[in-house]
Amino acid sequence: MTSTTAGTVRLPAGFRASGVTAGLKASGTPDLALVVNDGPEHHAAAVFTTNRVEAAPVTWSRQVVADGRVDAVVLNSGGANACTGGQGFLDTHRTAEHVAEVLGLSAGDVVVCSTGLIGELLPMDKIVSGVDAAAAALSSEGHEDAAVAIKTTDTVHKVASHAGAGWSVSGMAKGAGMLAPALATMLVVVTTDAVVDREDLDAALGAATTVSFDRIDSDACMSTNDTVVVLASGASGVSVDRAALTEALTDVCSDLARQLIADAEGAAHDIAIEVIGAASVDDALEVGRAVARNNLFKCAIFGNDPNWGRVLAAVGTTRAAFDAAALDVSMNGVAVCRSGGVGEDRSLVDLTEREVHVLVDLHAGPEAATIWTNDLTHDYVHENSAYST
Amino acid sequence: MTSTTAGTVRLPAGFRASGVTAGLKASGTPDLALVVNDGPEHHAAAVFTTNRVEAAPVTWSRQVVADGRVDAVVLNSGGANACTGGQGFLDTHRTAEHVAEVLGLSAGDVVVCSTGLIGELLPMDKIVSGVDAAAAALSSEGHEDAAVAIKTTDTVHKVASHAGAGWSVSGMAKGAGMLAPALATMLVVVTTDAVVDREDLDAALGAATTVSFDRIDSDACMSTNDTVVVLASGASGVSVDRAALTEALTDVCSDLARQLIADAEGAAHDIAIEVIGAASVDDALEVGRAVARNNLFKCAIFGNDPNWGRVLAAVGTTRAAFDAAALDVSMNGVAVCRSGGVGEDRSLVDLTEREVHVLVDLHAGPEAATIWTNDLTHDYVHENSAYST
């Protein structure tokens, strides 16, 4: 039941993967990955962006996953294939067809994920030759190579794992944000050799993403391409029930989510907004998200400025149950706001460490939730002001 | 029916104003203003922040305005008196009492507005002596002095006027954002010498703010202190009906709103998000606001990068009626996205001017609305990362 860190994660039994340079990225770094489930089982579940402007590969992959079977996932960086009209969908279809042809599969069992700039058609000749190269490079040792090939602005690749008794779960992720709503594009492939019921897999993935990727909110921007897909090969021969599967997927997804926040574009602080005393989990989430999305608060944290008034101003925009005269706020353990008014001296708050903890007590009930976000920095503005040019 | 620019706006008949240095701001610049209505009429209406964490002066002033009569407005920069508990409310009450005593009014007819850092008590000795000095300085020529004294991070003071036949409207504003929701604190005092019905004044102010301050959204952050108050002296002797009053107040409020956007903290571009083809005005506003609040889009504009995919990704987060395959987007006149896909070459878009026009056609109906916002810049991060320290 342990999570491991980047650089040491292998594929579970029954999987092969690879990452190659197809030439999609000007940087010349790896940009096309394959993950193949060799079975004996081919169960799958997925969660996609809720953005109504969804990329062609999302539209395609929803259909692929609908029957619960996925044999392979092909992922490319260097282009999102979003807002690309009918041609974009044909290109996704052709990518899946080519993967199927090379690997002897059905195109209807191939998930396609793309990430990069919106509004540009993919160079299909490079995709096709890249798929050929990736298929030739497939290996049970290929987890790291695939994780590297799906990076865009990521400074490090992200992997995580969970070890059960005779079975395991591995995961790879790219992105600097969250799912539904989401920032930049988040792509996640989780693999397990457990023998699972397909409905359990679906339920476990939903439960895991709800408390992991859904609770990170780097900059409130929802992508057109976000995809989290889990594949189960059954190759371990070990049957795993819904509870254990949920625990394992939550472990891996939470680990990956924290890695996404830690590598968010231009961020200097990782900020946990913990909301307690809420009348409902939804209230706690609404308050946490309101604080996480407040640009003035995010700039203050960048400046190591414990400007707690901005926390209260953000809380005040929500519909959550609370009495403004009862609100308590602590920053890194200092109770700067008590009963909606001035508490301990704000100058006692030390914000020099990367991790920041903001605790909001609504005093309105027993529920709680934590949203992870980042500060708003010069580097965030810089990285995002010159992305497509 | 003309609007005028800063530096040339005088008070309507029946008003006196002043602005003095009370010593609230470390900078030593003017920080306390008075606006007094000498009548013969004393009609008033106001709109306040919808933030549930509201500052003491907002709580007080709501009560003052409830009966439709206001004799004076006292405004201070250098401290918001928000999240200051029972003592903060007592301080606001004492400020109103002192103004009333010095001017021979009832405290219940004195509106109080404060702006500055949240979570600090005001230095009441300086407020009291500042009120004394401001009362002594009251003058029918004091409009500019008052407008200067309410500045915080504003680089220029903001005034506007509207001339009717024998009557006029003048306005002053501070802030770098919007009302409900709002950024920084927006304070606005509008004065007119028209003879008006009190209900007409209330309706006209509501109509004017709905299409002016409510449609600017610099950074989506709603303040605890936002107040827009209008005072009518009747001193011109000219009766004005609701329609003419609405037109005049809309003229002045729209002028001030644009000045707020033009002076928004650290902004390098003023961006009009015009949404057309909407099924309803609410849909158009939701779409406009979603684009205006998308940090990735705002960074792109700062970088003169016509990254229209970020516009579509923002539109896709809304509940507005539209078909993603029908969306058209133009940037500064270049149709970069047609029918949800690639349109004209994005490199044709010139974003070097301060004003930027983004046109989104939802192709879902006859309604339209425009939201004004700003880009997200290094200077915004800088100014807001070191505000309270």
Image (spheres, coloured by chain):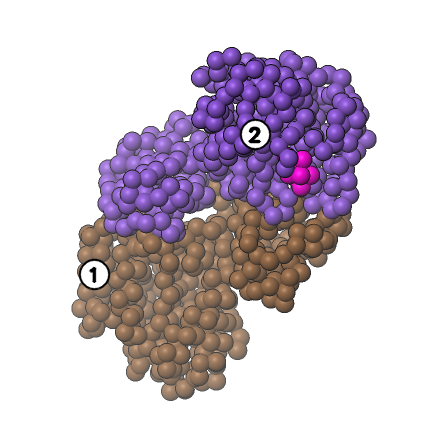
Chain colours: A purple, B brown
| Residue at the outermost right position | A125
* Residue A63 magenta-highlighted: yes
Give the image quarter of residue A144.
Answer: top right
Q: Is residue A209 above or below residue B229?
A: above
Tell me which amino acid carries mark 2. Arg
Highlighted magenta segment, given as a residue range: A59-65
Give the image quarter of residue A51.
Answer: top right
Instruction: Write the residue at 19% across / 65% down.
Output: B97
Percent position (x, y) of residue B128?
21, 59
Q: In this figure, which residue is indicated by the disc labeled 1? A: B93
Q: In this figure, which residue is indicated by the disc labeled 2? A: A198
Q: Quadrant of the C terminus of chain A?
A: top right
Tell me which amino acid carries mark 1. His
Percent position (x, y) of residue A66?
63, 37
Q: Nearer the viewer, mark 1 or mark 2?
A: 2
Badge 1, how many Cα within 10 Å: few under 14, some, many 20+?
Answer: many
Instruction: Write the residue at 37% across / 82% down.
Output: B197
Q: Nearer the viewer, residue B122 or A331?
A: A331
Q: Is residue A298 above or below residue B268?
A: above
Percent position (x, y) of residue B157?
44, 60
Q: Is residue A116 left or right of residue B28?
A: right
Q: Is residue A362 left or right of residue A149?
A: left
Q: Is residue A179 above or below residue B301?
A: above
What separation in Å lies between label 1 and label 2 (alpha carbons)?
65 Å
- Label 2 lies in what chain? A
Instruction: Write the residue at 60% across / 53% down.
Output: B354
Q: Nearer the viewer, residue B179 or A130?
A: A130
Badge 2, how many Cα within 10 Å: few under 14, some, many 20+?
Answer: some
Percent position (x, y) of residue A328?
27, 41
- Label 1 lies in what chain? B
Q: Is residue B7 visible?
A: no
